[in-house]
């Protein structure tokens, strides 16, 4: 039986302690400063947070960072959060001094980008928006991320099982208004051989594990909020 080296074990325990400590700290801060319960706040706002995260994932190309955010390993999860925050902040930074801007507007399309007053206004407003988004991202890291880890422990099970290859590889193809499901490798290969170039569409939790996990988490939190409102 393989054993974890002391280093990884310590990092997991330290990371787990950090997440638990942040949860306890947030409970105290929310109760003392905001006069509300931190867990209830997350229960009601976590749906929006999860759905927004899933939508952002569709525009995120770095699969490794997204996979880190559904990891059972708390150290890997924290690393993913820090990577996400760092890349997000870097993407908000203006172009380096001395670097010639490269406009991306289509040729011949005039929407007033060359107007000096409009450019100056956008520069000012962008500075304010970048500051707000930076502060919100820090708030997400401190308040939402700790509980997100524990929610993803459950909501991420289907995606992690899909990544392990433990779920059936299923493909679907629509023809003449009928949807045909293909579950075995032989059926998929046979169908693809006779299919047009676009082939059959793959249905798998492993296609976008982070987005699937966030959608599942939103569903769980939504149901939890309903149950609390009915029974609480």
Image: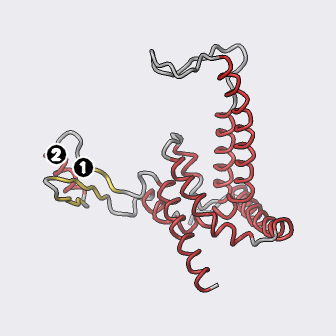
In this picture, residue 130 sits left or right of residue 213: right
Establish if 79 lies above or below 223. above
| Percent x, y of residue 82 | 69, 47
Judge from the rendering whether residue 175 lies leftward or rightward of residue 135; answer left or right: left
Which image quarter: residue 42?
bottom right
Q: CA distance from mark 2 to mark 1?
A: 7 Å
Q: Secondary structure at mark 1?
A: loop
- What residue sits 53% from the left and 59% below the top? 214
Give x and y (percent) for residue 46: 61, 63
Binning the other alpha carbons within 10 Å of mark 1 as few (below 14), some (14 to 19) or many (20 upward) gives many
Q: Residues within 10 Å of mark 2 (few under 14, many from 20)?
A: few
CB-based contact (under 8 Å), mark 2 and mark 1 = yes
Secondary structure of the residue carrying tag 2 is: loop
Q: Between disc 2 and disc 1, whose residue precedes?
A: 2
Q: Residue shown at 49%/54% (left/top)?
A: 211
Q: Which residue is mark 1?
A: 200
Q: Nearer the viewer, residue 110 or 65?
A: 110
In the rendered image, the residue lying farthest to the right is 32
Q: Is residue 11 above or below residue 99?
A: below
Q: Point out residue 113 in the picture as x, y percentages from the top left corner.
A: 58, 20
- Where does label 2 land, which residue? 195
User: Which residue is drawn at the image coordinates 52% and 47% (left, top)?
Assistant: 57
Q: Residue 121's image quarter?
A: top right
| Position in image of residue 172 (x %, y %) | 25, 56
Question: Quadrant of the image for the N terminus?
Answer: bottom right
- Against 91, residue 227 (above or below) is below
Residue most toward the bottom? 231
């Amino acid at each position: 039986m393989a054993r974890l080296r002391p280093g990884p074990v310590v990092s997991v325990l330290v990371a787990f302690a950090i997440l638990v400590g942040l949860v306890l700290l947030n409970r105290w801060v929310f109760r003392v400063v905001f006069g509300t319960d931190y867990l209830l706040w997350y229960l009601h706002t976590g749906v929006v947070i999860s759905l927004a995260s899933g939508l952002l994932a569709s525009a995120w190309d770095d699969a490794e960072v997204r996979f880190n955010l559904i990891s059972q390993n708390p150290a890997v999860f924290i690393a993913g959060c820090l990577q996400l925050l760092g890349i997000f902040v870097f993407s908000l930074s203006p172009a380096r001094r001395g670097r010639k801007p490269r406009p991306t507007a289509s040729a011949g399309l005039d929407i007033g980008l060359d107007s000096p007053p409009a450019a100056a206004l956008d520069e000012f407003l962008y500075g304010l928006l970048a500051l707000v988004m930076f502060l919100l991202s820090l708030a997400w890291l401190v308040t939402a991320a700790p509980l997100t880890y524990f929610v993803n422990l459950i909501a991420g099970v289907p995606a992690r099982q899909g990544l392990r290859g433990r779920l059936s590889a299923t493909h679907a193809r629509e023809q003449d208004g009928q949807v045909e499901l293909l579950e075995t490798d032989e059926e998929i290969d046979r169908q693809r051989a006779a299919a047009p170039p676009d082939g059959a569409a793959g249905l798998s939790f492993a296609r976008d594990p982070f987005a699937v996990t966030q959608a599942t988490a939103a569903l769980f939190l939504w149901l939890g909020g309903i149950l609390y409102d009915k029974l609480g």
